[in-house]
Image: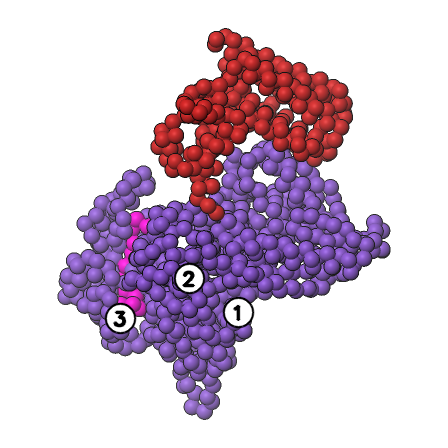
Amino acid sequence: MELVQVDTQRAYEQIREKIITLELAPGALIDEQHLAEELDIGTTPIREALKLLFHDDLVVVTPRHGLYVADISIPDLEQLSEMRLSLESLCARLAAQRAGADDLTVLEALRQEQASIPPEDSRRLLDIDHKFHQALVKAAKNKYLTRTLEHFFGLSQRLWYMALPQLDFLPTAVAEHLDLVEAIKNGDADRAEQIMHNHVQGFYARVKEVLQAKT
Amino acid sequence: MSTRNDSQKALVLGIDTGGTYTDGILLEYHSRKVLASHKSLTTKRDFSIGIEAVIQGIRIEDPSAIQMVSISTTLATNAIAEGKSKRVALFLIGYDPELISSFNMQGRFATPHYHYFSGGHDLYGQEKEPLDLPAILAKVSEIKNDVDAIAVSGYFRPLNPEHENRSYTAISSVCDLPVVLGHQLSTKLGSVERATTAALNASLLAVLKDFVVAVRRALERRQIDAPLMVVRGDGTLMSDEFATRTPVETIHSGPAASAIGGRFLSHLDDALVVDIGGTTTDFALIENGQVTVSEEGATVADYKTAVEAANLFSIGLGGDSHIALNRENKVTIGPRRVVPLAYLADQYPQVQSQLHALSQRSRTNATPDWLEYWYLLRDPQDNSLLETDHEKALIEFLADGPKPLPEILKRLDLFHKVQIGAGNLLRQEIIGKSGLTPTDLLHVEGRYASWDTESASLALNVFCRFQLRDPDELRQQVWLQMTEAIVHAIVTFLSGKKLELSTVLEDDDIGRWFFYNSLYANHPHLETRFRLRQPIIGIGAPAGIFLKDVADVLHTELILPKHHQVANAVGAVAGSVMVTEEILVYPRVSSDGFEVTGYYVQTKDERQLFEAASDALEQARALSRERALGAALRSGADHPQILMKEQADGLDTYRIQAKAVGNPRLTH
């Protein structure tokens, strides 16, 4: 076991958390030294962690000015939503066709848990939402889709925090998950695809409103 | 001690964290030469403090020349015994709750949070009952915030881990807790032991990971950059990475390392190894150059596990055992360990003058409990560690030095020491206890003179005066009692028979008669004697003193190899790196149970089907060999050799085992 790896992993998780929860704002300059002191981790693991975040598209490098938290712009958001709309819809379609009994049990358990979480517990809701989407990809049984979508989940988690002030989307999301699980249980691929499409589209519309309100 | 710096040499660092001391040695691997050694006190609250003290004490000139560091640790054993391990939920699939409770076995699961689920396979690996996954996930959702890890064990599961694997996938889809599967730790069929092993392993994951990281940091601070190995309970080595995944395998690694070290230093292939430490004396047997492994799994804190461990025996008797009087005014030695008074007085000179004053008092005012001192080991910087008023008053009272027990009771206005409730402070190593020990008696005799001999002598005199006994006679009695206890341990360990010792004179038990007659030759006509065929290898600083009479009574030779004082630390580096891979081959039976329709090859994570038994066996051999070899190389073995073992196990079922064994690879 290498200490650098242990520390890199820890640094990666903590910095990623800061970016996702918007504590490190989109577009903000990243100060390696400051992070190292704040997290009490050596500069080498911090640098390694930032490299990983660069691969996640959460950190950008500019040749002259150093490292920044990736900004969220409207065009960027649109590109992201295009990808997720088609990939997540495909994922829902495949899941409806391929999900086994165990997959359905997991989806059902996650859905029930989501319904039981109070709307103000945003951290847990995000966590469960993420697990729900991961379980769907697993049910779709396509490893390339799994890998690709994992990348987009990472990017979308930040948007989730942006949309958070508009809490009214939460009950809708819970209801959509219920419908989705029903459709997958019934093997109704068209319906699953449609629900997912609406689900993702609704989410991006919400984020876009928040973003436009800011600018 | 300092060392010559020579980068051509293969320098390795061995460390053993025992119950009392942490020992370290610097060894040249090829010549087996111990270049330096150091001892420091074990710091149970954080083992890495003691470990760093040892590394510092060895004063390594060129840390970059170190090519391997290996550690044996009592961490896992301690964490379990002291309840410091993490909270675990144990999921039992296909177990019969009525059967378990009718044999009263639920107490053996090593966690109070166990839950039964339907599912499971039969003797042939066929599904007996479908897995109740919804119930499992409902339980996970209910308990996931109250536990730190989940262990899953299925009845008869090694034959078909499908239900365990499906549970794993589902549980890890809904929560982030670490999940341990029984079949990955042991392929043995004992279902309760396997469940216990899984639960213990889950409870130790975080404990061992923190330990490995702390040791790594300590090494980094000392500029040592080398592979880190951890000793298993059978004395073999595994990489630190493996250890963090299978921490349960480190149970009993300390005594196993002692035995390996004794063999390594003595070059003997058949011997009984006796390790006398401060707290305990441990026994292990070397046969054909190997430490014998217990047929049964290791037992820790009364939990029977399925972990392979050296065949060990341990008694609570050592150089720092407390010599005291019991209720019947009989002298007892141990099992409690205290700091010798000679050492305490060496650290705090006022103790000697207090003992002087004590010896001037009248006999009835100098009871033996005045010889029990309590003292502050470290400043409880953080006052939040002190919970009760008694604790606070005690710390305040001890701030200006060690105090005898009666004074403490008077100060706190209590009658008995149990009322003080200092268990927490003792565990946190904030306060320590000191008293009369065999080590003090050695000071009196001049056989060991590191600390304050005068105080040891005063203490012994006070102890004897109270009983109106002669100090010389009492010393003889203590040595005799120790010899008796060690011989008794050896006889019961090797024979596998029990023998209750008794001092009742009217006793017609022939076993006891034989035992005592062999020790003391007191029968006028019949002479009996023990003869141990193999020599005794003595380990630990006082081994030469305490084992001399033992060897005489057993009519065998006592061998004290050079550096036997630190053989435990030598053993930490002397073991081989070993990885075992076991594969089961068993028949696939038709649904009516009458026909064999093929043979399964079952590894830890997959199952393949073959038509002919011979093909299945061939595949099992190839797979186990390949997997063991790969794992051994990843684990840091140099040119591992493969030992194959095949064993029929019940109806048409075969266990194919590949053991890859090699010396640790000494490179960066």
Based on the displayed image, in which of its 4 quarters is residue B133 positioned? top right
How far apart are the two marked residues, 1 and 2, measured between alpha carbons?
24 Å
Range covered by the magenta-colored residues: B429-441
Are circles 3 and 1 on residues that touch, CB within 8 Å? Answer: no
Q: Which residue is mark 1?
A: B290
Identified at 47% across, 89% down, the residue is B526
Palette colour of chain A: red
**Identity, as a three-letter code, of the amino acid under mark 2:** Ala
The subunit carrying tag 1 is B
Give the residue type at disc 1. Answer: Gln
Q: Would you say B400 lies left or right of A56 here?
A: left
Q: Earlier in the sequence, mark 2 or mark 3?
A: 2
**Residue B10 circle label:** 2
Q: Residue at x 29, y 74 (%)?
A: B475
Which residue appears at 40% of the width and 62% of the height? B8
Q: Which residue is mark 3?
A: B448
Residue B521, labelled with which disc? Answer: none
**Could you classify mark 1 by the number of other residues whose Cα lies within 10 Å: few (under 14), some (14-19), or many (20 or more)?**
some
Q: Colour of chain B?
A: purple
Q: What residue is drawn where x is 55% and y is 24%?
A: A155
In 3D space, how far apart are the residues under numbered discs 2 and 3 (Cα atoms)? 34 Å
